[in-house]
Image: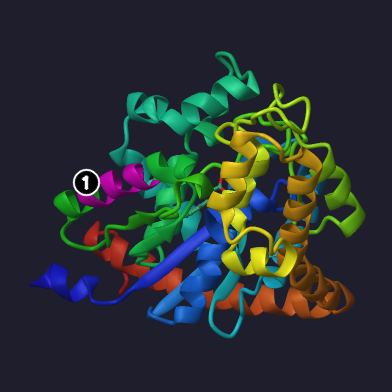
């Protein structure tokens, strides 16, 4: 009965670490989804935030990088069409209740559980921490649970690498509610339906688009840069001559088309094919050159990026407005999280003077 009451509201929340500009992988994996959810309007509250506190857990020695990228990510958000009238956009460190909630949740999680988190595990390996793992870094899944629960989020749209984080947040919620009584709301992760969108490969064909590898197409890249990147993309290495039959399956050019192109794009830029299936069939049979496919992919990406670039230019020229949006969003988010903190402290019997 009580649970039903709590779950009535639909609250969407998600965020990104400000460690670099957002790219096409972010776009198909999450940003596009968010804008769709926002425009469908089928929710009570929606929050999108810039996770600077979390970015500092592995960039604590590079505060300038985090600071600069807070604004870059805000520009990326606004330029893909997140609308501050519909979505509260805020900065994580401005919400004072989050570290306090984190502190209380830390009691509910074991060290072994944190070390078992697959995303944390692979990040530790990738960052070469060895046995010198900063406590703050290992702890970030708990702080992420605070981010989610502070807003009573029910829906968390993320890339699939974030599923272990949401699972851990759910465990914390259950554990908290068990001990202190029904207080927190259990979140659900939402990942893209289209499987190719969940993990877009890099332009070099490597597993994932990742700024540390330098195989990304950024939302802020200009046309020339996009053209260069697309034309030098990895394709099927055995497709040497136009007549050769080609492989579309592990071919990032076709994977991008799968994630990005629509039948309308074919009508507009490559009308001799009805859809991607026809284009693929031709490539697989032989007789279709990479350059032609890449030129089409370039048009498709440009079709998506041109309006994004235009909006970005507007906000870059009005940067005071961006700060204003972030400030107002942060104030709003802060007061919402304060309410949750109050409930949490009451449940934990540490609400001495209320
Ligand atoms: N971990 C996410 C990332 O690396 C950022 C993030 C922090 C987040 N807190 C969150 C995402 C809460 C969703 C919900 O990009």
- Which quadrant of the rendered structure holds the C terminus? bottom left
Q: Which residue occupies 51% across, 72% down? A: 36
Residue 51 visible from this viewpoint? no
Which one is in front, 334 or 202?
202
Q: Which residue occupies 70% across, 53% down? A: 22
- What range is drawn magenta here? 166-175
Q: Is residue 142 above or below residue 100?
A: above
Q: In which quarter of the image is residue 288?
A: top right
Magenta stretch secondary structure, dominant:
helix
Q: Is residue 147 left or right of residue 286?
A: left
x and y, in percent, of residue 194 in the image = 45, 52
Q: How crowded is mark 1: few (under 14 residues within 10 Å), some or many (20 or more)?
A: some
Residue ID for mark 1: 175
Q: Which residue occupies 76% across, 39% down? A: 290
- Which quadrant of the rendered structure holds the N terminus? bottom left
Q: Is mark 1 within 8 Å of ligand 1?
A: no
x and y, in percent, of residue 204 in the image = 73, 31
């Amino acid at each position: 009965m009580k649970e039903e009451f709590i779950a009535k509201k639909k609250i969407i929340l998600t965020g990104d670490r400000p460690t670099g500009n957002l790219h096409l992988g972010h776009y198909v994996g999450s940003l596009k989804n968010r804008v769709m959810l926002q425009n469908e309007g089928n929710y009570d509250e929606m929050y999108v935030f810039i996770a600077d506190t979390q970015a500092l857990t592995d960039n604590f020695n590079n505060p300038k990088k985090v600071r600069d990228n807070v604004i870059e990510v805000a520009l990326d958000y606004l330029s893909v069409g997140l609308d501050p009238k519909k979505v509260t956009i805020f900065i994580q460190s401005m919400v004072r209740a989050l570290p306090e909630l984190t502190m209380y949740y830390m009691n509910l999680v074991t060290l072994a559980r944190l070390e078992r988190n697959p995303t944390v595990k692979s990040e530790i390996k990738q960052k070469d921490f060895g046995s010198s793992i900063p406590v703050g870094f290992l702890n970030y899944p708990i702080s992420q649970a605070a981010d989610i629960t502070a807003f009573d989020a029910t829906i968390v749209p993320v890339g699939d690498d974030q599923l272990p984080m949401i699972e851990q947040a759910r465990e914390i919620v259950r554990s908290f509610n068990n001990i202190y009584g029904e207080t927190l709301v259990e979140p659900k992760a939402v990942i893209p339906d289209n499987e190719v969108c969940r993990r877009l490969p890099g332009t070099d064909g490597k597993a994932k688009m990742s700024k540390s590898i330098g195989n990304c197409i950024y939302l802020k890249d200009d046309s020339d840069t996009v053209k260069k990147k697309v034309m030098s993309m990895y394709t099927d290495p055995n497709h040497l001559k136009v007549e050769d039959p080609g492989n579309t399956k592990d071919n990032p050019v076709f994977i991008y088309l799968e994630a990005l192109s629509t039948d309308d794009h074919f009508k507009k830029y490559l009308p001799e094919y009805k859809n991607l299936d026809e284009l693929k069939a031709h490539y697989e049979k032989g007789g279709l050159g990479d350059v032609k496919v890449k030129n089409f992919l370039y048009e498709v990406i440009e079709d998506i990026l041109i309006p994004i670039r235009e909006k970005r230019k507007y906000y870059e020229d009005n940067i005071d407005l961006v700060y204003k949006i972030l400030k107002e969003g942060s104030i709003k988010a802060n007061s919402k999280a304060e309410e949750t903190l109050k409930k949490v402290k009451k449940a934990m019997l540490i609400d001495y003077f209320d």
